[in-house]
Amino acid sequence: MEKKKFYITTPIYYPSDKLHIGHTYCTVATDALARYHRLRGEEVMFLTGTDEHGQKIEDKAREAGVTPKEFVDRIVEGPGGVLDLWKLMNISNDRFIRTTDDYHVQSVQRIFKRMHDNGDIYKGTYKGKYCKPCESFWTESQLKDGCCPDCGREVQDAEEEAYFFRLSKYAGRIRDLLENTDFLEPRSRVNEMVKNFIDPGLEDLCVSRTSFSWGIPVDFDPGHVVYVWVDALSNYITALGYENDRYHDYEQGWWPGVNIVGKEIVRFHSIIWPAILMSLGEPLPKKCFGHGWLLLDGGKMSKSKGNVVDPYILAEKFGVDALRFFLMRTFPFGSDGNFSNELLIQTINTDLANDLGNLVSRTTAMAGKYFGGQLPGDAGATEDEQYLDQLYAQAREGGGAVNLALGFPEGDPVKYDVELIRAALELRDKYEAQMEAFAPHNALGEVFKVIQRANKYIDETAPWALAKDMEQNGPRLAHVLYNLLEATRICGILLTPFMPESMEKLFAQTGAGAEGRTWDSAARWGVLRPGTAVTKGENLFPRIDMDQAIQELEAAAEAAKKAALPDIELEPQLETPVDFDTFCKSDFRVVKVKACEAVKKSAKLLRFTLDDGTGTDRQILSGIHQWYEPEDLVGKTLLAIVNLPPRKMMGLESCGMLLSAVHTEKGEEALHLVMVDDAIPAGAKLC
Ligand code: MSP
């Protein structure tokens, strides 16, 4: 039988800055969904990529003194770039599209032409605001306080020839799609779209520009480049080979697919994208799911606010799988969530170190201690064979609910077995329902209920007590451990899409072979062969010391922030002229340091006793202890302005000021006293 095809995409990311935890959230979620579909045995195509055109990239490249292509190459392919991040996060994309790839450029030109030829793209005039110094067009809403958002200068009304897409023509069909199908989820986003964009009336969309050149040229009208959305959105089909010869998957039944996107671009994916496809006469996507944002302190993360969270730091500190798990377990996928390091550590400690980690380490340790790591061959058996035979048989046949009508007397230990087995056998269906509803956080919630049930089972069955009399209780103890291993195996399978590497390790420790890792076997009990070797290995998820980790994270974030700062920053030169007479009023002299000491109770001040050539010592106080130790300055020849009015500091009088040179280095102020040749006598005047 032909496998079911499942095509899933992330948005394509702007490579204008390094990606942060918000982008990582979006990609990890799509990856977990892709892996889930693969686990089910479907044939999966998972696409991600980068959206590399536009004025912003052109401007940033100019600032950096490189070509736009060189600029995006560095962010996409360079060290710490987009590809590196996805590799680190174990993202299993099958394809990666860059909108600068030749085949995509060719497809977009053909798509644009087809829409033009069928009358859906026409030439008109784009009205906007223009910033002359920046040579940039802005819309009213992009302006900052009515001025250019880049340079803050005034803008003028301006017009530009542009092509438009007849979006208005499709308003009725789009409304129908949104209101009468389950194309867009979660449902709340449908109301937002209809109320904010469809009800007020859809306007035609500007799809070409002439005021910048970093875009896909409109081949039949030189001077125009394709503007943003026809270029970016088409990636979902050009990456399958639509209108190009690079791939041939579009005709092979891969389209339509599922587009996972963040909430701010739902508008483009649920209105413009279907309208483009309608214009082309192509099938619409199966689904658009608009997830929420990860917020920081309740607000949006952004490079300009300087509050982005670096996934590299978190992955290095806590491990890739723990980070992936945290992102998926904590935040309901359709809603916004508040990121914090505390929450991250708490989730790792509670779910992974405590619940899952303990279950695995206690079970494998007991199997080692009581049975040398190998459960006896009859470990799957129990006192109530009849019950379990029935239970297993029904489960294996996959035929409906297990009949739990058999009663167990109060206190009968097998009762606990039944509860555990039932919870584990019902898990896959519950998990599946949640994954199908794009609710990975709930799917994980279901898995953790079973993990918690299994930990409770250890307390209820008290294997350590059974082990006191192995002759009498050995078979029961083996059976208890077998049940724990089976429950762990089933949970492990369902956690694999979220923590692929750690689950490999879990299976290696608990002895689950290939046949015990499949989707099918997640709904069956009794799969693990009782003789299989069980090994207590490394602790899968070590507990994290919250205070220490927070301190280290803050230090790492600070260091990263610093590393991103320019090496040297200089004070801008003053533009206001100073007349010569005013300058001459300042009396600069060479002075020699006779003595220097730190001022008591002051962290900053040094007290200088100086020879200024007059024969009387001069005292100057200077707040430079941060940069100099007093003993290092004795004997040095410095410069001072000596006709400033005396000033009192910490009860001491300062008569003048020593001259120093200052700049900012990696965000910190650096200061150097101006030292001159020791051969110059004290009192010599600067002129
Ligand atoms: N290039 C466009 C998408 C074009 S798709 C045809 C774009 N790129 S983006 O890099 O700005 O954003 C990519 C995705 O990252 C979006 O889905 C966006 O919602 C997501 N995120 C960026 N910051 C985010 C958070 N703080 N939280 C969650 N997702 C966020 O938009």
Image (cartoon, rainbow, N blue to C red):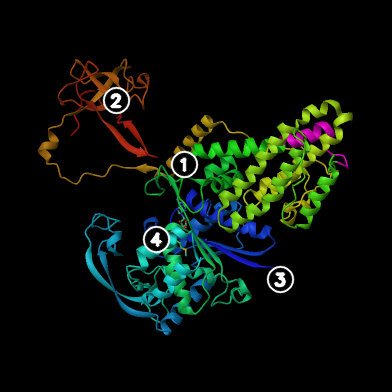
Q: In the figure, 205 relative to 462: above or below?
A: below
Q: Earlier in the sequence, mark 2 or mark 1?
A: 1
Q: How far apart are marks 2 and 1 (CA)?
A: 29 Å
Label 4 to label 2: alpha-carbon separation? 58 Å
Q: Which of marks 4 and 2 is in front?
A: 4
In the rendered view, does 335 fall on the left or right side of 154? right
Give the prevailing secondary structure in the magenta stretch.
helix
The reply, left or right, for residue 286 in relation to residue 4 is: left
In this orientation, does residue 15 appear?
no
The relative height of residue 517 versus residue 644 in the rendered view (above or below) is below
Q: Distance between the residues labelled 1 and 4?
A: 38 Å
Q: Which of marks 1 and 3 is nearer the N terminus?
A: 3
- Say which quarter of the image contains residue 623: top left
Task: Name the residue at 35% across, 76% down.
Answer: 163
Q: What residue type is labelled 2?
A: Gly
Q: Nearer the viewer, mark 2 or mark 1?
A: 1
Q: Give the range drawn in magenta.
A: 361-378
The numbered dot on residue 623 is 2
Q: How far apart are marks 2 and 3 (CA)?
A: 78 Å
Label 1: few (<14), some or many (≥20) within 10 Å?
few
CB atoms of marks 2 and 3 within 8 Å: no
Q: How many numbered callouts?
A: 4
Q: Where is residue 325 in the image (x, y as percent from the top left)?
A: 59, 46
Instruction: Using the image as rendered, state which of residue 489 and residue 388 is in the foreground.
Output: 388
For disc 4, the marked residue is 192
Tell me, yes or no, whether the two marked residues, 4 and 3, touch with CB atoms within 8 Å.
no
Task: Find numbered disc 2 in the image and state the secondary structure of the residue it sits on.
Answer: loop
